[in-house]
Amino acid sequence: MALEIERKFLTKDDTWKSSATGSARILQGYFARTPLLRARIRIYGDKGFITLKTEPGMLVRHEYEYEIPKADAIEMIKQFSVEPIITKVRYDVPYEGVVWAVDVFEGANSGLVMAEAELKTPDQVLALPPWAGSEVTNDRRYGNSNLARYPFITWDKNGNPPWEKDDA
């Protein structure tokens, strides 16, 4: 069974940049959303991927990801995306034996910077870098599929996306 175990954090500042060892642009579009599933097409640098994941906002999720030709990924994003495209630049930032992925979002999610660390087990001890801020692992607002539907720039000054206002 394919599992993704990751913790997500907002960043406090941009001091992580001095440790970045590489970066790649990511474009991703979602083509299916159910209470149990998020399905996306992603272009990560010069490669394409199709991914099926369980709902965001959990430490451990089922994830199935397969490489596909980049040209197919481009066409599939154009044809099948049901929500706006997520665009971001992902930086690789090593810290104490873990390579963190720091995502700097663009477009409608501009201003949002998140860092995530993939773990081997849910109880793995994770040393937090000084630039790691609030943990948002279990906060579904910060799932990429939710950011596609409710971009960061639409959130109110208290950090509530439109669905939070609708449910109030």
Image (cartoon, helix red, strand yellow):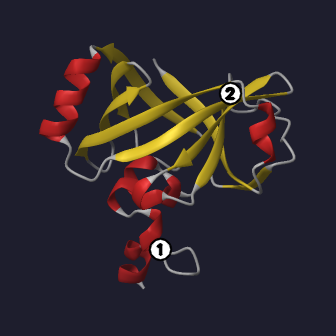
Residue 29 or 25: which is nearer the viewer?
Answer: 25
Q: Is residue 9 above or below residue 53?
A: below
- The residue that mark 2 highlights is 119
* Residue that lies at the very extreme toward the front in this rendered image: 18
Q: Position of residue 108 (x, y in %)?
A: 40, 60
Residue 164 is marked as none
Residue 57 or 18: which is nearer the viewer?
Answer: 18
Q: Position of residue 106 (x, y in %)?
A: 47, 51
Specify the amino acid type for callout 1: Trp
Circles 1 and 2: CB distance less than 8 Å? no
- The residue that mark 1 highlights is 155
**Can you tell which quarter of the image residue 37 is in?**
top left
Q: Secondary structure at mark 2?
A: loop
Q: Residue at x 45, y 30 (%)?
A: 62
Q: What quarter of the picture does the C terminus occupy?
A: bottom left
Q: Please state if 72 lies on the left or on the right of 50 as rendered.
A: left
Residue 29 or 125: which is nearer the viewer?
Answer: 29
**Can you tell which quarter of the image residue 118 is in?**
top right
Q: Please state if 135 lies on the left or on the right of 74 as rendered.
A: right
Q: Nearer the viewer, mark 1 or mark 2?
A: 1
Q: Position of residue 150 (x, y in %)?
A: 37, 64
Q: Is residue 137 visible?
A: no
Local crowd at mark 1 within 10 Å, few (<14), some, or many (≥20)? some
Q: What quarter of the picture does the N terminus occupy?
A: top left
Q: Is residue 139 above or below residue 19?
A: below
Q: Residue at x 38, y 49 (%)?
A: 145
Q: Position of residue 25 (x, y in %)?
A: 47, 33
Mark with earlier residue (1, 2): 2
